[in-house]
Image (spheres, grey):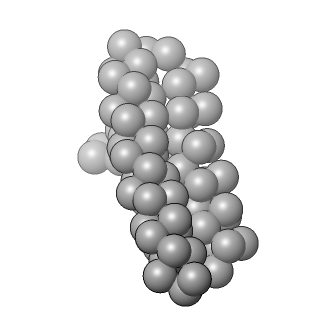
Amino acid sequence: MDANIKRKNSRLINLSYITSAVTYLIGWYLITLGNLWAFIFAVPTLVLGLNLIKIGERRYGLVLIIFFIVWLCIYYSYMPGQSLNR
């Protein structure tokens, strides 16, 4: 039974990371085009990270939350006129 739960959580972790990466790439592309509302594509990473923490996979959830923070900084640096590299 424990192996079954682990396998289910493993699938959920993999799906969370893949979904997070895809939404990041879509958001990054839209940010480079100048669409400010593309920040919304970072939100699934936060939601998935909190969900992983809730089901007991704290380590993987915290990694996704750190990705969320880093990705917001990256999005900000790619916004037109709002560079962190000044």
User: What residue sits 59% from the left and 55% below the top?
Assistant: 48
The reply, left or right, for residue 80 in relation to residue 72 is left
Q: Quadrant of the C terminus?
A: top left
User: What residue sits 28% from the left and 46% below the top?
Assistant: 85
- The quadrant in which residue 76 appears is top left
**Vertical relation: 37 (above or below) 39:** above
User: x, y (%) of residue 7?
Assistant: 45, 70
User: What residue sits 54% from the left and 33% below the top?
Assistant: 41
**Vertical relation: 11 (above or below) 15:** below
User: x, y (%) of residue 25?
Assistant: 34, 33
Q: Nearer the viewer, residue 86 or 48?
A: 48
Q: Nearer the viewer, residue 73 or 30?
A: 30
Q: Nearer the viewer, residue 71 or 9?
A: 9
> Seen from this angle, which residue lies furthest left?
85
> Seen from this angle, which residue lies furthest bottom?
2
> Seen from this angle, which residue lies furthest front?
1
The reply, left or right, for residue 54 in relation to residue 25 is right
Number of marks in the rendered image: 0
User: x, y (%) of residue 72?
Assistant: 49, 47
